[in-house]
Amino acid sequence: MKLTPLKISEYKKDNRKIAMLTVYDYAGARILDEAGIDVLLVGDSLGNVVQGKSTTLPVTLDEIIYHAEIVSRAVDRALVVVDLPFPYCQLGDKEAIRAAARIFKETEADAVKVEGGENRESTVAALIDAGIPVMGHCGLLPQSIHQSGGFFIQRQREQLLRDVKAIENAGAFAVLVECLTPEIAKEATELLRVPTIGIGAGGDCDGQVLVFHDVFGYVPPENKRPPKHVRQYADLKNIITEAAKNYINDVHNSTFIVNGQFPN
Ligand code: KIV
């Protein structure tokens, strides 16, 4: 049965943990949905892991809609959340609603994700008033990377707790918390009625989220080891490298097809 924002929100009451991953394509979304993932995020991290850029800022609304349409069409059960790319929320409530409305008109997504805390409370409330469910995103904010100056663990306890509470008060059904200390993430989780979904935020959140390419090791050859907060469950880089070398050898040595057949 298809998951809704309300059902994901109720996981917390039922003491059920939420498993969330990013995804950007049809096969990936079908596989993760069949495997039983709860939430799929079409993240603007596609700028990093699909496009090979150094930040999420260049990702356009058209690009996120392109991937969200593919992913949302692939899914039967998982909740599909889509990042509102830079700078639609930063431009104010009307621009945020306009962008989210395009996502809802042109894809089968279920919700959008908005980066920010107290400073985005009114925008989150305006989106929800327009009938668009919102997942908040507090802590480290990749869309503000030039302002914050880098990817640091977030330690401003009081501000962070005010941020998550403001986003809950605005009506978000869940709040993603990125790179909070485990202690602050635990406190935020205890403070909120809605679930927290952590990335680099310890083990006490109501759910966990990771980026597809990090979890499955589908990364460029120069990435020697995953970031500290990543638990890697597969090593696709090496699996694909080995398979590609075998294929290349077979073609080069005329052993790809032998006597009109694939050898075993
Ligand atoms: O875009 C993204 O991948 C994110 C991560 C923090 C999960 O927002």
Image: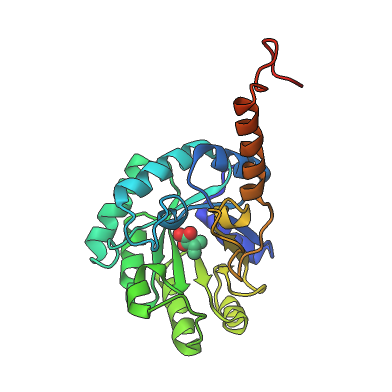
Q: Residue 203, relative to residue 6: is it above or below?
A: below
Asked whether, in this view, residue 68 is left or right of residue 203, the answer is left
Q: Residue furthest right?
A: 264
Q: Residue 110, relative to residue 155: is it above or below?
A: above
Residue shown at 31%/56% (left/top)? Answer: 130
How is colour applied across the structure in the image? rainbow
Q: Quadrant of residue 149?
A: bottom left
Is 129 or 39 nearer to us in this picture? 39
- Please identify the quadrant where the C terminus is shown: top right
Q: Residue 157 location, x and y as percent?
A: 50, 88
Q: Residue 184, relative to residue 264: is it above or below?
A: below
Q: Residue 217 location, x and y as percent?
A: 61, 54
Residue shown at 62%/68% (left/top)? Answer: 206
Q: Residue 177 location, x and y as percent?
A: 52, 71
- Please identify the quadrant where the N terminus is shown: top right
Q: Residue 213, relative to residue 76: is it above or below?
A: below
Q: Quadrant of residue 112?
A: bottom left
